[in-house]
Image (spheres, grey):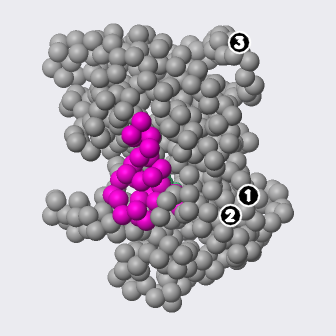
Amino acid sequence: MQSEEIRQLFLEFFEKKGHKILPSASLIPDDPQLMFTVAGMVPFKPIFWGKVDPIYTRIATCQKCIRTTDIENVGRTPRHHTFFEMLGNFSFGDYFKREAIELAWEFITQILKIPEEKLWISVYEKDDEAYEIWRNVGIPSQKILRLGKEDNFWGPAGPTGPCGPDTEIFYDTGMEVETADGKEPNPANTEGRFVEIWNLVFTEYYQDENGNLLPLKRRNIDTGAGLERIAAMMQGVYYNFDTDLFLPIINRISDILKVDYAKDQRKDVSIRVIADHIRALVFLISDGVFPSNEGRGYVLRRILRRAARHGKLLGADRPFLYNVVDAVVEKMGKIYPEIVEKSNFVKKIIHGEEERFLQNLNKGLEIVEKVVRESGGKIDGKSAFKLYDTYGFPLDILKDLANENGYVLDEEGFNKYMEEQRKKARNAAGEVEFSERTEYESLNFHTEFVGYDTLETDVKVLKIK
Ligand code: ATP
Ligand code: MG
Ligand code: MG
Ligand code: MG
């Protein structure tokens, strides 16, 4: 089953169950607390908070998401992306636990026809109600894990706010990857054999300043299922990258760089990172994010530079990412017309950024080599910061280099230098932002001023979910 059909079946199913289908909101949320839309619930946050009353009490969407905290996971796990699509159904004071669980179960087993024996469940350890509902659905007790707050309790997003227990549905790929170290397969570890496909959150509490959980006046349902993971499950592949969502992009990369996919594991990692990152770049730029040294724009830079460095590993010495844009537009343009409309602009931005970074990439890599040669495999904080500051190496690249080659990277040292520079930059912030912006203003593309978000904002909010 192709991804397009999954998206459609999901929305049709929930429409039949009385949900209003809404289009995806922008990746840039209308929300000062958040850098990006990180989940399907983000556009509805004011309703969850009780600040706004809902027009519809049942909604379903397929929402574009960006999770920068997963950048390093991309290429390392089979199923984490920076950009991904989240299928979700929401209830605002309408149905609650029982119906939410039954709806998800019906969709997976009746519509997608996944065999029940392939599915596992986790619930919050104190949530006997959810546990009983799953037992009544017919799940044997040994396949319902009771986990702690860290795994199965959502929120609040900040010191106070709505929160509640959740329940997650896992798919057993049957791959014995986790048993290599002699441990039992563990569904709670979703980086190997078991895939977390769907999270159902029961926002029923409000957490006050003292950490007390008070009942909310409106009990809500917030669910999220990754389309890429469902596609992998439906297409019987272990890597999300081997689904129809990514293969056309991978084939384009493989053609352009003349490297075969699925021949060499190291090269596959690079190809997958590029395939992931190019989607993020296309969607972010189309939603109005520009490269810069601050906030959202810097996330864009990090993603682009990491992709360019992986391109270099595959032998690319010239800009090539901009040439992959069309493959993304061909695959996703029907669903997201904004990327068709902006495609030439997107290519222009990517090409310019690639060109500029490539000049520094070679010099930076030479410095890394020299540093590790002289130190016996260490990248000290000062050198790491110099690579960042002078050669435009985001920390992601240094982490990749350290992982690939077994170098020791002094992140703490790097952060110290970084913090010092931030203090200095705060005093001159206006100027920096201005020079970054004028560069793109000449391209005559409208965007909002993104303000002075820092990367931490994103991390803080993401940690919660
Ligand atoms: P994981 O434990 O795998 O990192 P999560 O618990 O962080 O996932 P949730 O916040 O519960 O994910 O998001 C709901 C769903 O969105 C997940 O069950 C998964 O299907 C999907 N999802 C989350 N993060 C990603 C990602 N980085 N790439 C692709 N899909 C994702
Ligand atoms: Mg996660
Ligand atoms: Mg999880
Ligand atoms: Mg989860």
Residue labelled with disc 3: 442
Residue 25 appears in the picture as rendered: yes
- Judging from the image, what secondary structure is the residue with disc 2 in? strand
Tell me residue 209's x, y (percent): 66, 55
Check if mark 3's residue and mark 1's residue have beta carbons within 8 Å: no
Quadrant of the rendered image containing residue 332? top right
> Residue 440 at x, y = what percent?
66, 16
> What is the spatial separation of the Cα atoms under label 1 and label 2, in whole angstroms?
7 Å
- The answer to whether 278 is drawn above or below residue 87 in the figure is above
Q: Is residue 266 left or right of residue 89?
A: left
Q: Main secondary structure of the magenta part?
A: helix
Q: Position of residue 65 (x, y in %)?
A: 58, 47
Residue at the disc numbered 2: 60
Q: Quadrant of residue 222?
A: bottom right
Residue numbers of the magenta segment: 225-252
Say whether disc 3 or disc 2 marks the residue closer to the N-terminus.
Answer: 2
- Whether the residues at callouts 1 and 2 have beta carbons within 8 Å, the answer is yes
Rendered residue at 27%/29% (across/down)? 402
Q: Closer to the camera, 137 or 345?
A: 345
- Circle 2 crowding by C-alpha within 10 Å: few under 14, some 14–19, many from 20: many
What separation in Å lies between label 3 and label 2 (alpha carbons)? 39 Å
Identify residue type, mark 3. Answer: Ser
Image position of 315 with respect to 205: above or below: above
Relative depth, front residue between 410 and 73: 73
